[in-house]
Image: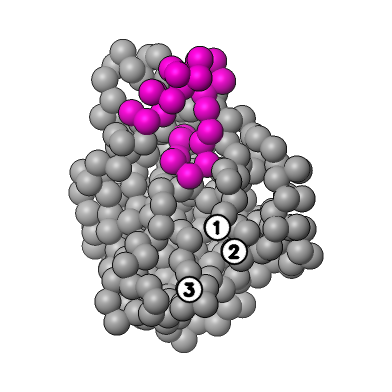
Amino acid sequence: MKITPAAGRLGAVVSDLDLRHATEADIATIRGLIDEYLVLAFPDQGAMTDDEQVAFTLNFGDPYIHPLGRRLGATFGAGHIVDDLEHPPYQDHWHTDVSWDPEPPAYGTLRMLQRPDRGGDTIFVSMYAAYDALSEPLRFMLDGLTAVHTMGIGAAFRSKAGDATVDATMAEFSGTTHPVVRTHPSTGRRYLNVNQAFTDHIVELSSDESRAVLDLLFAHCTNPNFQLRWVWTEGDLILWDERPTMHFAVADYWPQRREVARVNVR
């Protein structure tokens, strides 16, 4: 396989590899690469099926089903995200997938099935880089703080799953507390663990203090110096580490159609 770094702080393109036939040695190499680059893009995977995407992703963890899917009786597999005229996109905000779950996913894969004529990029941010760029006094203050993550107002979820399912899920997941700064179990590196979509407030601060600190962190984390912007080609598959990253699915293509297949693992 050929490895080409894709941006300054994160991301690499892994080419000349058909993931359907990846060997144990290939997977071992990819595990090392994902720890180093956080986001890996594999072009030319257009022949891959949903089941083959699931099999590849399971090399990196155990099955994860989104809480809304659990409530609807979904089984583990590749979920298709379709955005078109009747289904407006809702991923166009900074988020880390399902951070409001006490046990959120650790890795994800996305496979581009149909891309619009233009636009529809995905932007990833290294939360290692965001943490490292903070001043030492601010890092010292943040260490030891915890934040509550919620589903937010749930408007995006309601458009996809319906009010009844979202209300029941909100009752079950009313708020989950995570450290503001976490240490990655594989790399030992520290990273910011907040995101604009789902981080509601910092427990140890007053309401005004929490809002001021989170607003500062949200603005800081979206610095382009910490980003990789991926311009999709149909057949691309991306594997990323959910924990020290957040992402933004650019919705500039709507109402054109865009379809991706997603698999997450713990």
Q: Is residue 209 magenta?
A: yes
* Residue 192 on image: x %, y %: 41, 33
Q: Secondary structure at mark 3?
A: strand
What type is the residue that disc 2 sits on? Ser
Tell me whether circle 2 and circle 1 mark residues in contact (CB < 8 Å): yes
- Residue at 52% x, 73% y is 87
Q: Which residue is mark 2?
A: 159
Q: Earlier in the sequence, mark 1 or mark 3?
A: 3
- Which residue is drawn at the image coordinates 45% and 40% (left, top)? 195
- Residue 223 in sight here: yes
Identify which residue is drawn at 65% across, 56% down. 66
Q: Residue at x 37, y 65 (%)?
A: 251
Q: Which residue is mark 3?
A: 83
| Label 2 crowd bin: few (<14), some (14–19), many (20+), radius 10 Å | some
Q: Which mark is residue 156?
A: 1
Q: Measuring from the top left, give residue 65's x and y in whole percent.
A: 68, 58
Q: Residue 175: percent from the left, percent from the top?
A: 65, 35
Question: Within the image, what quadrant is residue 222 found in?
Answer: top left
In the picture shown, does residue 1 fall above or below 179?
Answer: below
> What's the magenta region?
193-216
User: Which amino acid, mark 1?
Assistant: Ala
Residue 77 falls left or right of residue 233: right
